[in-house]
Image (cartoon, rainbow, N blue to C red):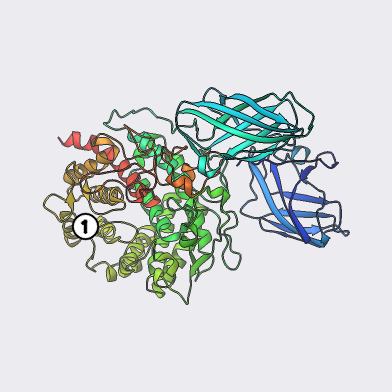
C-alpha cells in the first residue's frame, strides 16, 4: 500500500540506520512503525530499535522482544516463527507501542542485522515526496494533463481552476498539483489533501467518497489555497490527474495444446490464481497477484495461538475452517484422480503450492489434540465494512471447538483434508506427509468422540456456514482415513454412518453423502453404493426434480447456481472414474462445465473466454489502487473492478438463465472458494473427458 509520509525534518542518524516515524504520542506512551525493504534472503531476523531517551517498556505484536540495553535506549526484536522467512523485494513492517514518562515522542532509528545499510525504509530516501509506482500510472506511463487557470490571488490567498478531459469512466483518482511558489494549504470540495513534498511546491489531492467516479467529458475542479509568501503575485501551476483504477496486469494466456473447444489448461491456471488472490497471512515471494499484499498478520487464538494464513472464503475477510477444509479435500481429490490434466497444463507445481497453503493453515488451527479453531473474524463485524484486506482494522475474534464444545462435522472434514493431503504429499515430502497423517489421526479420534455440529456451539457461524448434520461428515472422514491408511477400523466406522438417507440432493461443503457413496463404490464395488449414486443423479438428469434452464444449466438454487452445478459435475466425473456410467456421466458433466465456460454466449469465469464477468462481488479486486479510498461507496460504484480476479467463478444465473454482472448483486455475482474448488476439479476431469468421449464415439 502506498503511504504518504510528511517529514518536517529528519533527525541525524547513524550510518546504516533508518528513521522510524512516531505516528502518535500521548502522556505516557507513543506508537511507531518500522518498515524495511528486504535486500537479502532471511531465514530469521533481529531488529534493533534505538531511541534518543530511555523507554520503560515496549509492546510488539509481530515480533518477540528479546532484550534491551541497561539504559533502555536500545531494544532488540526477534522474528516470530511465522514471519521469520523474508525474501528479497518484500517489505517487513513492525508496529510497536512504547511507554515512558510524560508526553513521549522520541527520535527513533532502526536496523536489521544482515541487511545492506540496515535496510531501507520506504520513503526515507526521498523525504516528503510522493512517489507513485508505475503500475498506478495511466496507460502510456502518464496521467491526464489538466488545464490550469489562476482565477484570483490576493494577499497570499488564491483560487485555482483545474480542467481535465476524461475520455473513459474512472473510479479512484489522484491529482498531482505542482506550483512555482510554495503553498501553505490547499482545499477542494471534490478531493482530500493528502500531503506535499518538503518545499511545499507539489501537492497530492485524492478523490473523496462523493467524487470517486468520473464520467467521460470535462471535469472541472476549484482549488482554494494560501501561499507561504503572501506577497507572491505570479502563481503558475500544472496538474496531472492519475487514474487509480487502472491495472495493466492481466490474467495471462497459455496455448490450447489439446485443441479442445475450451482451453482447459488456461482455466486451470487461472482458477489456481483465484485461490492465490484469496490468501491471508504473509504472502510468499512467488505471489502472482500484484494487487494483494500481506494481511491478517495479527490473527490469533484466545491463548495467542498463531492463526495467520489460510483463505478468505469469498468477498469478505472471515476465515472459516469448514469450507476451507472441504475445498482442500475437493482440490486434492482432483489432483489425485486427474493428475495427468495438471501435468498437461504445466500446473502441477502450482497445484501443490495451492493445496499446501490451506493445509499449513489447518495444521495451525489444530493447535492441540482436542482443539480445532474453526473461525477467525466475526461475519457481522466484517460485513459492515468494504475495503482491502491489507487495511483491515476491525476486531477479528477467533472461535474453536474443544472437549466442551464438539463438532464432528468440521473435525471430520479437516481430518479428511489432512488424509487426502497425506496421499498427495507422501511421495513428494515424506516428513510433511507424516505430519499431516498424525494430525488426521488425532483429529479424527477427537471428532468421533465429540459428535454434533460445530455451528450449534459457534453461533457466529450460523448465518454463513451453518452445518445441518454431522453423520455424512463422519462417513466421509472415515473413508478418507481408510484410503490414506488402509486400516479396516476406519471402514468399519464409515459403514455405521454411510447408509443414512440424504435429505438434500446436492454435493457441497455441507452435504458430502454423494461423495461418500462414490468412494464406497470405488473401494468395494458393491452394487448398493452404485445404486445410491444412480438414484442421486436421477434428480439432476432430464425428468428429474432439478430444473433445467432453457439454455441447459441444471439449476438448483441461488445464490451459487453455478457452484451447485460444478460440484455435481465434479461428482459425476468422479463416479465415471469409478466405473459408474462413464460415458453418460462424463457427457453430462462436460455440458455443465461448458455452460460455465461460454456455451450461453459468454463466460462466467473472470478473465477467461468471451465477455466474462468484470464486476464480481469481491472487496479486494474492487478497490482502486492506493492512496484512493475504498469503502462501502466502492461496493455500489458502477463499472468493472479495477483488478481482475483471475479464474473466479461467479455465482451464476437464475433458472431462466438471467444474470446480472453488477458488484452489488450477490445472488448472481458473488464468489467463493467452495464454488471454485468443485469447478476446478471438474475442469481437470473434463479436460480428459473430450478425448475419452471421442474415442468411445
Residue nearest the viewer, comparing 27 with 363: 27
- With respect to residue 352, does 611 lie above or below? above
- Residue 534 at what x, y percent from top left? 17, 56
Left or right: where 423 falls relative to 628: left
Q: Residue furthest left?
A: 543
- With respect to residue 110, does 480 lie above or below? below
Specify few, some or many for label 1: CA neighbours under 10 Å numbering under 14, 14-19, or 20 or more: some
Left or right: where 262 falls relative to 294: left
Residue nearest the viewer, comparing 111 with 697: 111
Tell me the quadrant of the picture where the N terminus can be found. top right
The residue lying at 67 percent from left, 34 percent from top is: 203
Can residue 43 be seen here? The reply is no
The residue lying at 49 percent from left, 32 percent from top is: 249
Residue nearest the viewer, comparing 373 with 620: 620
Left or right: where 179 falls relative to 457: right
Q: Which secondary structure lies at badge 1?
A: loop
- Residue 14 at what x, y percent from top left? 85, 41
Left or right: where 587 falls relative to 303: left
- Residue 646 at what x, y percent from top left? 42, 38
- Residue 230 at what x, y percent from top left? 78, 32
Q: Residue furthest bottom?
A: 404
Can residue 424 be seen here? The reply is yes
Tell me the quadrant of the picture where the C terminus can be found. top left
- With respect to residue 568, does 116 lie above or below? above
The residue lying at 23 percent from left, 41 percent from top is: 590
Which residue is labeled 1 in the image? Answer: 525
Which image quadrant is residue 448 in? bottom left
Residue nearest the viewer, comparing 268 with 634: 634
Q: How many marks?
A: 1
Amino acid at each position: 500500500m502506498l503511504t504518504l509520509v510528511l517529514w518536517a525534518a529528519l533527525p541525524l542518524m547513524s550510518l546504516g540506520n533508518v528513521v522510524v516515524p512516531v505516528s502518535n504520542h500521548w502522556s505516557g506512551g507513543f506508537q511507531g512503525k518500522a518498515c524495511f525493504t528486504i535486500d537479502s534472503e532471511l531465514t530469521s531476523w533481529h531488529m534493533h530499535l534505538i531511541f534518543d531517551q530511555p523507554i520503560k517498556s515496549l509492546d510488539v505484536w509481530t515480533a518477540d522482544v528479546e532484550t534491551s540495553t541497561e539504559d533502555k535506549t536500545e531494544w532488540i526484536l526477534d522474528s516470530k516463527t511465522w514471519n521469520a522467512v523474508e525474501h528479497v523485494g518484500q517489505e517487513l513492517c513492525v508496529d510497536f507501542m512504547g511507554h515512558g514518562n510524560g508526553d513521549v515522542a522520541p527520535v527513533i532509528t532502526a536496523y536489521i542485522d544482515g541487511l545492506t545499510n540496515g535496510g531501507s525504509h520506504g520513503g526515507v530516501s526521498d523525504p516528503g515526496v510522493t512517489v507513485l509506482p508505475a503500475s498506478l500510472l495511466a496507460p502510456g506511463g502518464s496521467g491526464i494533463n489538466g488545464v490550469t487557470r489562476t482565477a484570483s490571488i490576493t494577499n497570499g490567498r488564491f483560487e485555482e481552476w483545474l480542467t481535465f478531459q476524461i475520455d473513459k469512466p474512472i473510479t479512484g483518482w489522484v491529482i498531482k498539483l505542482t506550483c512555482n511558489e510554495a503553498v501553505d494549504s490547499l482545499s477542494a470540495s471534490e478531493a482530500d489533501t493528502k500531503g506535499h513534498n518538503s518545499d511545499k511546491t507539489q501537492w497530492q489531492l485524492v478523490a473523496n467518497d462523493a467524487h470517486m467516479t468520473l464520467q467521460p467529458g470535462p471535469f472541472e475542479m476549484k482549488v482554494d489555497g494560501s501561499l507561504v509568501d503572501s506577497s507572491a503575485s505570479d502563481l503558475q501551476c500544472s496538474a496531472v490527474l492519475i487514474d487509480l483504477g487502472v491495472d495493466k496486469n492481466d490474467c495471462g494466456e497459455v496455448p490450447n495444446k489439446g485443441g479442445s473447444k475450451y482451453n482447459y489448461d488456461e482455466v486451470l491456471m487461472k482458477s489456481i490464481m483465484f485461490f492465490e488472490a484469496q490468501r491471508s497471512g504473509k504472502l510468499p515471494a512467488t505471489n502472482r497477484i500484484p494487487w494483494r499484499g500481506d494481511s491478517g498478520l495479527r490473527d490469533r487464538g484466545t491463548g495467542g495461538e498463531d492463526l495467520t494464513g489460510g483463505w478468505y472464503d469469498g468477498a469478505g475477510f472471515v476465515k472459516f475452517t469448514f469450507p476451507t477444509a472441504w475445498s482442500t479435500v475437493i482440490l486434492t481429490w482432483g489432483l489425485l484422480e486427474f493428475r495427468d490434466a495438471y501435468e498437461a497444463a504445466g500446473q502441477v507445481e502450482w497445484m501443490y503450492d495451492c493445496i499446501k497453503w490451506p493445509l499449513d493453515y489447518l495444521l495451525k488451527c489444530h493447535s492441540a489434540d482436542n482443539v480445532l479453531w474453526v473461525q477467525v473474524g466475526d461475519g457481522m463485524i466484517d460485513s459492515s465494512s468494504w475495503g482491502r484486506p491489507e487495511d483491515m482494522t476491525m476486531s477479528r475474534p477467533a472461535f474453536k471447538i474443544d472437549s466442551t464444545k464438539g463438532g464432528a462435522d468440521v473435525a471430520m472434514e479437516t481430518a479428511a483434508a489432512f488424509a487426502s493431503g497425506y496421499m498427495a504429499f507422501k511421495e513428494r515430502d515424506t516428513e510433511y506427509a507424516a505430519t499431516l497423517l498424525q494430525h488426521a489421526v488425532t483429529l479424527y479420534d477427537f471428532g468421533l468422540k465429540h459428535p454434533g455440529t460445530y455451528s450449534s456451539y459457534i453461533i457466529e457461524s450460523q448465518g454463513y456456514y451453518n452445518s445441518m448434520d454431522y453423520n455424512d461428515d463422519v462417513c466421509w472422514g472415515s473413508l478418507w482415513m481408510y484410503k490414506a491408511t488402509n486400516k479396516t477400523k476406519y471402514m468399519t466406522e464409515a459403514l455405521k454412518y454411510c447408509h443414512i438417507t440424504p435429505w438434500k440432493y446436492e454435493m457441497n461443503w455441507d452435504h458430502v453423502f454423494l461423495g461418500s457413496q462414490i468412494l464406497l463404490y470405488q473401494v468395494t464395488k458393491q452394487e448398493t453404493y452404485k445404486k445410491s449414486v444412480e438414484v442421486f443423479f436421477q434428480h439432476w438428469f432430464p425428468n428429474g426434480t432439478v430444473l433445467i434452464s432453457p439454455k441447459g444449466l441444471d439449476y438448483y438454487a441461488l445464490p451459487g447456481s453455478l457452484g451447485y452445478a460444478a460440484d455435481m459435475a465434479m461428482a459425476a466425473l468422479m463416479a465415471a472414474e469409478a466405473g459408474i456410467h462413464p460415458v453418460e456421466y462424463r457427457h453430462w458433466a462436460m455440458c455443465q462445465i461448458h455452460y460455465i465456460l461460454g456455451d450461453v454466449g459468454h463466460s462466467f469465469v473472470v478473465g477467461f473466454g468471451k465477455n466474462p464477468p468484470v464486476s464480481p462481488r469481491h472487496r479486494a479486486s474492487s478497490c482502486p489502487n492506493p492512496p484512493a479510498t475504498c469503502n462501502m461507496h466502492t461496493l455500489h460504484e458502477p463499472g468493472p473492478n479495477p483488478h481482475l480476479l483471475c479464474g473466479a467463478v461467479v455465482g451464476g444465473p437464475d433458472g431462466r438463465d438471467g444474470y446480472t454482472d453488477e458488484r452489488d448483486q450477490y445472488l448472481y455475482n458473488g464468489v467463493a472458494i467452495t464454488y471454485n474448488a468443485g469447478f476446478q476439479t471438474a475442469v481437470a476431469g473434463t479436460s480428459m473427458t473430450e478425448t475419452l468421449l471421442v474415442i468411445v464415439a
